[in-house]
Amino acid sequence: MLLKSQPLNAETSRKFKTNVKNEFENIRSQHIGKMFDDVCDENRKVEWRVWIDWKWSDLKNAFYCIKNVIQNHVKWHKTLKKLHPWEGFDGLISVIQTHLTHYVLYEEKYGHAEDEYKKQKIAAAKETIDLLDKIKDPHDYFDKYRKKIEAEYPDYKSLVTEYHEGGTSYSGRFVAQGKGWAGMESGENQCEGYFEFLDEKFELVDSPNQNETNRLLSEIKTYTQEIDTAYKLAEVDSDKDFEKLGQLLKENLYSWWD
C-alpha cells in the first residue's frame, strides 16, 4: 500500500490554485528532463532573488524546527518518562497513542482534506487509539471474565511455600473447611482432598466430613474449568482486537497525513 493524494477542501484548493480553469496561462517555460534534475544541477545559475528566497526559507524552517522540538518536549514529557527498555510493547503502544492523539487534534484544527474524508481519517485514528488502550493491558481481557466467575464462588486461596534458599511459590486451589482446607494441589502428581498443617507442613489427612469435602472439591473443579474457558475466551477477544488493529493500520496508516 502506497501513499495516495487526498481530496482537498475548497479553501485549500483556492489557496494552491488547483482549480484554475486554464493552467497554461501561468506557464513561464517548458523543457524535457528527469524529475528533480534541475534541483540537483550544481552548475545551474540561480537568480539572486531566488537565492534570497531559499535562504529566507531555510531560516524559517530552522525557526519552526526549534519551535517544534520545544513543543514536542512539552507534549511528549509524560509519555517519555514512562518508557522503559524492559517494557517494549507497553512503551511502543504509548508512543503510537500519544502521536495519534496529537495527530487527531492537528487534523481537526488544520486538516485540508474534504470534510467526509477528514472525518473518516479522524474516526479511524480514534478507533485505533481506543484499541491500543485495550491491548496495552492484556490482563484486562481475562480479568473481565475472571471477576464474574469469582463473584459466584467462595474466596479460593493458594498454598504459599517459602524456601530456605529463598524464593516463594504459589500452588493449588483451596477453600477453608473446619480446621483445615479442602482443595487440590497443582502440578502433575497433584493430590486432592482434605488438608491440614502438621508441624508447619501441609499434609493430606482424613476429612472430618468427606461429603462436604467432596462438595467443595466439585465446586473447585467447576471453578477451574470455568477459569480455563474464560482464559480461552479472553484469547479470542484479544486476537479479534489485534486483527482489527492490523486492518485499521493497513487501511489508514498512509492516510494519516495532511
Image (tube, rainbow, N blue to C red):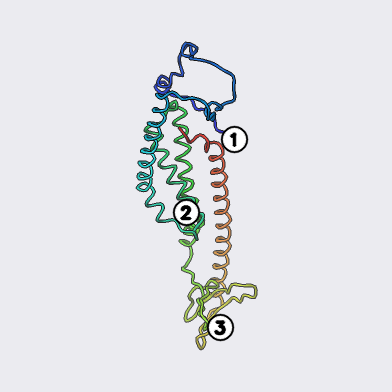
The foreground one among 20 and 62 is 62
Q: Is residue 209 above or below residue 34?
A: below
Q: Position of residue 205 (x, y in %)?
A: 57, 83
Q: Residue at x 53, y 84 (%)?
A: 201
Which amino acid is tagged 3? Answer: Glu
Which amino acid is tagged 2? Answer: Gly
Q: Residue at x 45, y 36 (%)?
A: 123
Q: Residue at x 42, y 39 (%)?
A: 103
Q: Position of residue 127 (x, y in %)?
A: 47, 41
Q: Is residue 151 above or below residue 118?
A: below
Question: Which residue is disc 2 drawn over?
Answer: 91
Secondary structure of the residue carrying tag 1 is loop
The foreground one among 43 and 126 is 43
Q: Position of residue 169 (x, y in %)?
A: 53, 74
Question: Which residue is disc 1 drawn over?
Answer: 1
Callout 1 environment at 10 Å: few (<14), some (14 to 19), or many (20+)? few
Secondary structure of the residue carrying tag 3 is strand
The foreground one among 149 and 88 is 88
Callout 2 environment at 10 Å: few (<14), some (14 to 19), or many (20+)? some
- Of callouts 3 and 2, which one flags the residue occurring earlier in the amino acid sequence? 2
- Of callouts 2 and 1, which one flags the residue occurring earlier in the amino acid sequence? 1
Question: Which residue is disc 3 drawn over?
Answer: 203
